[in-house]
Amino acid sequence: MDGNGRWATQRGLARLEGHRQGAENIERLLDTLFFYKIPVVSLYAFSTENWRRPQSEVKGLFSLLNEFLEKKLPVFHEKKIQLRVSGELTRLPARSRKAIEKAIEETKSYRRLVANFCINYGAHYEICRAAVLACRDLLCEKDKIRPNLFERYLYTAGLPPVDLLIRTGGQKRLSNFLLYQIAYAELYFTDVLWPDFSPGHLEEALVEYNKRTRKFGGLVTEERDSSS
Ligand code: FPP
């Protein structure tokens, strides 16, 4: 969800106003996700590197998160959305942690859409953490560490791999986001700043995704048929 800061600066507003509009934009996209029966969406809300931002912005982001959870939890209930969080919650302000735990607990039975918020998330840390946990459990059977077992130790355990990764805001990089899970994801980059990313823009990304041929390292059906 990149581009909040620039969206605000362009309008002479404080960066936090951009984040606020960015948070509001999440709800705007829900109906499109439902319409296309997308079962899981992961949203990069705060990275392990975002602590490097000025303290005032970090504090503002966590206040926004508290506000978001308080205001939108009824929407999650109403629309039967399961809230999940990927990331290390121990470093979060206690109030945010409690609000997150409450939302996770209250929505855990919903199946219509899983909204996986990545908060204090970094893929490097996630993979190192999973390796430590997996080795601890499977120490005597190292040769048994296979992708399907290893994945159980990631924050995203039980979620499918990423099909489509959308980065808004014009940068063409991955910024330590779900690096394990995006092995075969289709990548989509757009200059649109996150607060402006509308249902129409999301549809454009889905149309583009549908044009791609996904081979997962194999061959497309026709090629396989003609060579056999
Ligand atoms: C990147 O834009 C965005 C973030 C670091 C935070 C994303 C947060 C939100 C959308 C709102 C808070 C989330 C919730 C769930 C309440 P940037 O600040 O790097 O933008 P810039 O590149 O234009 O400066």
Image (cartoon, rainbow, N blue to C red):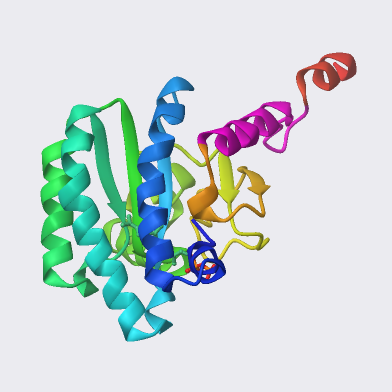
At a point 16% along the width and 63% down the height, the residue shown is 97
Quarter holding the C terminus is top right
In the picture, measured across the screen, residue 111 lies left or right of residue 43, that is: left
Q: Is residue 212 magenta?
A: yes
In the picture, measured across the screen, residue 57 lies left or right of residue 67, that is: right
Q: Quadrant of residue 169?
A: bottom right
Residue range (magenta) = 199-219
- Asked if residue 82 is positioned above or below residue 116 in the image, the reply reads above
Q: Is residue 149 visible?
A: no
Q: Quadrant of residue 206?
A: top right
At a point 46% along the width and 28% down the height, the residue shown is 32
Q: How many marks?
A: 0
Q: Is residue 28 magenta?
A: no
- Asked if residue 130 is positioned above or below residue 222 in the image, the reply reads below
At a point 48% along the width and 53% down the height, the residue shown is 195
Query: Where is residue 50 drawn, in percent x and y?
Result: 41, 75
Q: Nearer the viewer, residue 157 or 35?
A: 35
Query: Where is residue 227 drawn, in percent x and y?
Result: 88, 19
In the picture, measured across the screen, residue 215 lies left or right of residue 20, that is: right
Which SS type dominates the magenta stretch?
helix
Q: Quadrant of residue 30?
A: top left
Q: Is residue 91 visible?
A: yes
Query: Where is residue 152 drawn, in percent x and y?
Result: 34, 47
Q: Nearer the viewer, residue 58 or 120?
A: 58
At a point 12% along the width and 43% down the height, the residue shown is 105
- Asked if residue 62 is positioned above or below residue 81 in the image, the reply reads below
Q: Nearer the viewer, residue 157 or 95?
A: 95
Query: Where is residue 203 drawn, in percent x and y?
Result: 59, 31
**Residue positioned most to the right:** 226
Locate ligand 1 by image quadrant: bottom left
